[in-house]
């Protein structure tokens, strides 16, 4: 679908997580959406077979590419971003499970403010964008449809985040061109490269925001490679203090609590509708 960003899915070696990701992606994303599954020689035979079966049945307009030899997370993703030539994209982690409406909400977030360069949805393991609790790895939502509906019911304010987060992030193509893409000479992980990119974008006047109307679940948080956090600290001396201050003062407390209230209301309403529905004809004693 031309009005939605391209979904970039760099594959990883965890086959069970990939299977769940592909199933959720297909179920939660509008038919015809452009999706690029890119394999940096990470998927094994079972993973490749999973992808091939999924490609045969998906409703999405999906393509799969595989490198003969790996070049690393950040370098591989930079190749993907360069191939998209300034187009808006959403990078989805291969162990993440998007909830219904996720991509439409991220696209709407980018459209609301041309200064937004990155938009990150809520996540149960979302670090600064964590819900129901900040900075903790919680269980994925047991009721994805209700959680998605609650998110979509929030008034979109799009508050600032310290940096974008790797479970899922929408990237404005024009901002990427302005910032020069990922620094693959300094960072090998997508986790560290995305933080560096976010801080460079912020320095250029762009915004890194929370898309509070979308949710993408994940089993755990991302991680930097050894030594990369030291590189970030040397390049961005205020980064760790900024992140610590964000976690301490929790400026997202109010939208997080509002989401919890909406979720509870919708859950109670759905339970009431379930148990108050009339019995089908012929079931009465």
Image (spheres, rainbow, N blue to C red):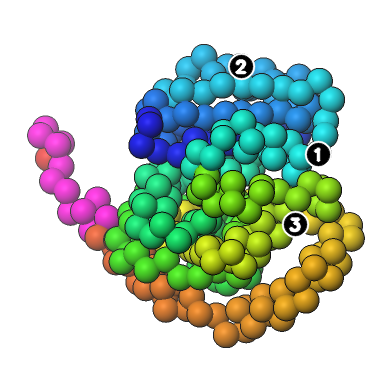
Query: Camera-side residue: 24 or 65?
Result: 65
Q: Which residue is mark 3?
A: 192
Q: How many marks?
A: 3
Q: Which residue is mark 2?
A: 52
Please tell me how crowded label 1 is: few (under 14), some (14-19), or many (20+) other residues with Cα within 10 Å: some
Residue range corresponding to the magenta coloring: 270-283
Verify whether residue 86 appears in magenta.
no
Q: Are marks 1 and 3 in contact (CB under 8 Å)?
A: no
Q: Nearer the viewer, mark 1 or mark 2?
A: 1
Q: Earlier in the sequence, mark 1 or mark 2?
A: 2
* Distance Cα–Cα, label 1 vs label 2: 23 Å
Vertical placement of residue 51 versus 206, above or below: above
Q: Earlier in the sequence, mark 1 or mark 3?
A: 1
Percent position of residue 114, x then y: 41, 57
* Distance Cα–Cα, label 3 vs label 2: 31 Å
Q: Earlier in the sequence, mark 3 or mark 2?
A: 2
Q: Residue at x 66, y 29 (%)?
A: 38
Task: Please say whether residue 97 is visible from this viewpoint.
Answer: no
Query: Which label number is shown at residue 72?
Result: 1
Q: Residue at x 51, y 64 (%)?
A: 207
């Amino acid at each position: 679908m031309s009005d939605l960003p391209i979904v970039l899915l760099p594959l990883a070696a965890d086959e069970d997580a990939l299977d769940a990701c592909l199933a959720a992606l297909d179920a939660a994303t509008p038919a015809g959406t452009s999706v690029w599954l890119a394999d940096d020689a990470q998927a094994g035979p079972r993973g490749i077979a999973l992808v091939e079966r999924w490609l045969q049945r998906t409703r999405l307009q999906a393509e799969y590419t595989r490198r003969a030899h790996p070049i690393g997370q950040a370098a591989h993703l930079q190749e993907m971003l360069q191939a998209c030539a300034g187009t808006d994209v959403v990078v989805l982690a291969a162990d993440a499970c998007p909830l219904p409406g996720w991509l439409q909400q991220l696209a709407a977030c980018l459209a609301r403010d041309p200064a937004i360069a990155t938009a990150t949805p809520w996540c149960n393991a979302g670090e600064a964008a964590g819900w129901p609790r900040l900075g903790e790895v919680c269980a994925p939502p047991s009721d994805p449809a209700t959680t998605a509906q609650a998110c979509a019911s929030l008034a979109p304010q799009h508050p600032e985040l310290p940096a974008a987060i790797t479970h899922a992030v929408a990237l404005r193509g024009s901002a990427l061109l302005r910032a020069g893409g990922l620094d693959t000479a300094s960072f090998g992980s997508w986790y560290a490269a995305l933080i560096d990119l976010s801080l460079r974008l912020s320095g250029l006047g762009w915004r890194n925001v929370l898309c509070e109307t979308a949710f993408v679940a994940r089993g755990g948080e991302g991680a930097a490679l050894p030594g990369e956090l030291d590189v970030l600290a040397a390049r961005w001396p205020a980064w760790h203090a900024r992140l610590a201050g964000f976690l301490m003062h929790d400026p997202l407390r109010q939208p997080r609590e509002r989401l919890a209230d909406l979720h509870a209301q919708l859950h109670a309403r759905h339970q009431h509708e379930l148990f108050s529905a009339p019995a089908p004809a012929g079931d009465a004693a």
